[in-house]
Amino acid sequence: MPSPTELLTATYRSLSALVADLRPEEAWQPTGCSGWAVLDLTLHLVDDVRRGLVALATPAEPPATSDAVAYWRAWQPTAAQDEDVAWRTRVRASVTGGLAELSAVYAELVAAVTVLGERIAPDDLVGTQGHVLRADDLLSTLAVEAAVHHLDLVAHLDRPGPAPEALAEVRRVLEGLLGGPLPVAWDDGTAARRGTGREPLDDADRAVLGSSAERFPVFG
């Protein structure tokens, strides 16, 4: 099992390579994130890695109030909130310099976050979005977010998917939230897509999951 810093480095390396490879004509292609185009989602990725950079430089007082799993339990936006974020992101994305500009910014931020992630002590406490987390737990949340959105970006594009260790971490978090294993027939990519509502459950899935099926999507 990779360390949190190794996990984040591998996750960002593959996603940054994908973002750098996006072509201008793909900017308004759909993604696996409903209502979001490639350009919208790329801006969101920039926002999230910037959040990680700020968090790693924001020491917090004990105790920790969340961890790598519980962080996602608190993330339950309403449909109206999702629509508002999507609309505001589309407006902002429309006035950027396009994918080339965002790709360059993303690469710079990823490099900075990776360096800070290697320098910070695993048990140091940091603050983000109203939570206090151990640094290692923060790195996990960043990797999980990046892996899920990597899947979103390639949903309608012929591009490589996330790093295997990134998808394994998504599965670990989903199983932590559920309090039990996901179906063994699901590979980690399927687990990530179905666990986050990107793919619907079928009757066979529901039969295997039992009452746990009512808790899907586990997070979105």
Image: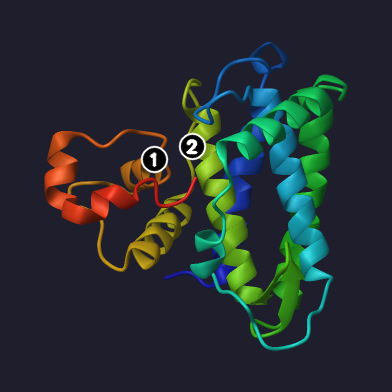
Residue farthest to the top, as pictured: 25
Q: Residue at x 54, y 31 (%)?
A: 33
Q: Residue at x 54, y 51 (%)?
A: 76
Indicate whether 207 appears above or below 19: below
Residue 69: image location, x then y, percent: 48, 67
**Is the image coloured rainbow, by chain, by secondary structure, or in one colour?**
rainbow
Residue 30 image label: none
Q: Which residue is mark 2?
A: 151
Indicate whether 220 appears above or below 171: above
Q: Nearer the viewer, residue 61 or 39?
A: 61
Using the rendered image of the protein, determine whether residue 184 is visible from the camera's viewpoint.
Answer: no
Q: CA distance from mark 2 to mark 1?
A: 8 Å
Indicate whether 202 appears above or below 164: above
Q: Residues within 10 Å of mark 1 (few under 14, many from 20)?
A: many
Which quadrant of the view contains residue 117? Answer: bottom right
Q: Nearer the viewer, residue 59 or 218?
A: 218
Residue 96: image location, x then y, percent: 86, 25
Q: Secondary structure at mark 1?
A: helix
Which quadrant of the view contains residue 126? Answer: bottom right
Amino acid type for the residue under numbered disc 1: Arg
Q: Residue at x 74, y 65 (%)?
A: 128
Quadrant housing the N terminus: bottom left
Amino acid type for the residue under numbered disc 2: Leu
Q: Residue at x 56, y 65 (%)?
A: 71
Q: What is the count of numbered marks?
A: 2
Residue 177: image location, x then y, percent: 39, 64
Q: Nearer the viewer, residue 175 or 157?
A: 175
Residue 43: image location, x then y, percent: 75, 34
Left or right for 85, reference 145: right
Q: Which residue is mark 1?
A: 193
Q: Are marks 2 and 1 in contact (CB under 8 Å)?
A: yes
